[in-house]
Image (cartoon, helix red, strand yellow):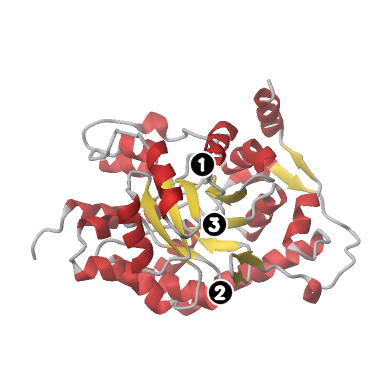
């Protein structure tokens, strides 16, 4: 069998290492405590957890975040993810489409992405490119899967640690070009290192309307790339960046100016609701989906996450919230660590 290109190997290694380092719980979310309503005045049937994405509606404020694509081995994974998203009626993002741009005439690479729209024809599907990508190439990616939105990932930390990574990050002008020429909504997305208020403000002033703050606590690409890198040790960056909760608190003042999405280390329906209480419009999961799919059938995985959607609504009952927007009014308490974080932020 001929040796696969390095780009294909990297995609496969990312999947393997993400599963190897998967943690089923995330104690960072214990740093916020929601105050329940002991006398909720509504029934489960009255709870409406749907949210709008443009002209389409999702059943829940949950979405499957970008994971993979770009090698023959990822075709089946993306097919299963697309089927899961279709069954649950929630959005799904494909993984970075860099390999489609590098191998545009390779039918297997192309299919690893196209299979998503083929499987989920009416669903909410997001394309995904690097902030390096010019608008012409980004449009090709959007067109390939008839994407409803385009994720543009900011992965400077990952690139620094990656042995074969790109160390040039002149992105602002490129993002401006994407905003001017791409006809679907653009989501500027971190990849697990969090987003500060300063960064979100800079993006908002550029014209960005949606960001995914993707904080530390979940899949750790500094750890993954350090494992792959046999030339230098970057283990000191393993805890680099802002957590998901810190990022949400950082960007809270901007919630009226832009749509804030949250991801990074989400491990339970309660984690989802905590993000919504802090103002997230929707919440993304990736590693838990991949982990369950690795060990269970697609049918069992669908049942597992259908239960998540039900449990999100059950938690809303406990908080006396009949709509997602009401969650922003829920009272909460923060840990000493997070309180200190806020106080230092205000200096």
Residue 71 lies left or right of residue 269; in this view the side is left
Name the image quarter holding the N terminus: bottom left
Q: Residue shown at 35%/55% (left/top)?
A: 138
Task: Give how far apart the Cα atoms at labels 1 and 3 are.
Answer: 13 Å
Above or below, comparing residue 78 to residue 101 in the picture: below
Above or below, comparing residue 46 to residue 130 in the picture: below
For disc 3, the marked residue is 284
Badge 3 marks a residue whose secondary structure is strand
- N-term mark: 1 or 2: 2
For disc 2, the marked residue is 88
The percent position of residue 85, horizontal first and vertical second, equals 50, 71
Q: Is residue 72 visible?
A: no
Q: Residue shown at 33%/71% (left/top)?
A: 114
Would you call the spot at circle 2 few (<14 residues within 10 Å), some (14-19), or many (20 or more)? many
Would you call the spot at circle 1 few (<14 residues within 10 Å), some (14-19), or many (20 or more)? many
Badge 1 marks a residue whose secondary structure is loop
- N-term mark: 2 or 3: 2
Q: Residue furthest front?
A: 180
Q: Residue shown at 56%/41% (left/top)?
A: 204
Badge 2 marks a residue whose secondary structure is helix
Task: Give how far apart the Cα atoms at labels 2 and 3 are.
Answer: 14 Å
For disc 1, the marked residue is 216
Task: Give how far apart the Cα atoms at labels 1 and 2 are.
Answer: 26 Å
């Amino acid at each position: 069998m001929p040796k696969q290109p390095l780009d294909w190997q990297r995609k496969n290694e990312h999947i393997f290492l993400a599963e190897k380092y998967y943690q089923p719980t995330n104690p960072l979310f214990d740093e916020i405590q929601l105050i329940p309503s002991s006398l909720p005045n509504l029934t489960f049937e009255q709870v409406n957890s749907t949210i709008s994405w443009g002209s389409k509606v999702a059943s829940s404020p949950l979405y499957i975040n970008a994971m993979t694509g770009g090698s023959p081995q990822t075709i089946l994974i993306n097919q299963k993810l697309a089927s899961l998203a279709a069954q649950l009626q929630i959005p799904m993002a494909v993984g970075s489409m860099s390999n489609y741009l590098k191998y545009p005439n390779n039918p297997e690479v192309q299919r690893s992405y196209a299979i998503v729209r083929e499987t989920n024809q009416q669903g909410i599907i997001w394309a995904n490119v690097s902030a390096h990508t010019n608008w012409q190439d980004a449009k090709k990616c959007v067109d390939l899967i008839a994407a409803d939105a385009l994720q543009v990932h900011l992965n400077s930390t990952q690139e620094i640690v990656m042995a074969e990574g790109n160390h040039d990050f002149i992105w602002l002008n490129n993002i401006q070009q994407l905003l001017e020429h791409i006809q679907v909504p653009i989501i500027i997305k971190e990849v697990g290192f969090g987003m500060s208020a300063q960064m979100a403000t800079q993006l908002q002033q550029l014209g960005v309307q949606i960001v995914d703050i993707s904080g530390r606590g979940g899949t750790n690409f500094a750890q993954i790339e350090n494992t792959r890198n046999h030339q230098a040790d970057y283990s000191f960056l393993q805890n680099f960046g802002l957590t998901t909760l810190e990022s949400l608190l950082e960007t809270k003042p901007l919630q009226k100016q832009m749509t804030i999405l949250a991801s990074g280390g989400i491990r339970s329906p309660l984690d989802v609701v905590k993000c919504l209480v802090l103002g997230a419009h929707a919440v993304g999961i990736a590693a838990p989906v991949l982990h369950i799919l690795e060990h269970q059938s697609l049918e069992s995985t669908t049942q597992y996450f259908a239960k998540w959607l039900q449990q999100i609504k059950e938690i809303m009952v406990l908080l006396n919230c009949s709509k997602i927007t009401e969650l922003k009014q829920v009272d909460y308490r923060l840990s000493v660590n997070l309180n200190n974080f806020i106080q230092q932020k205000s200096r």
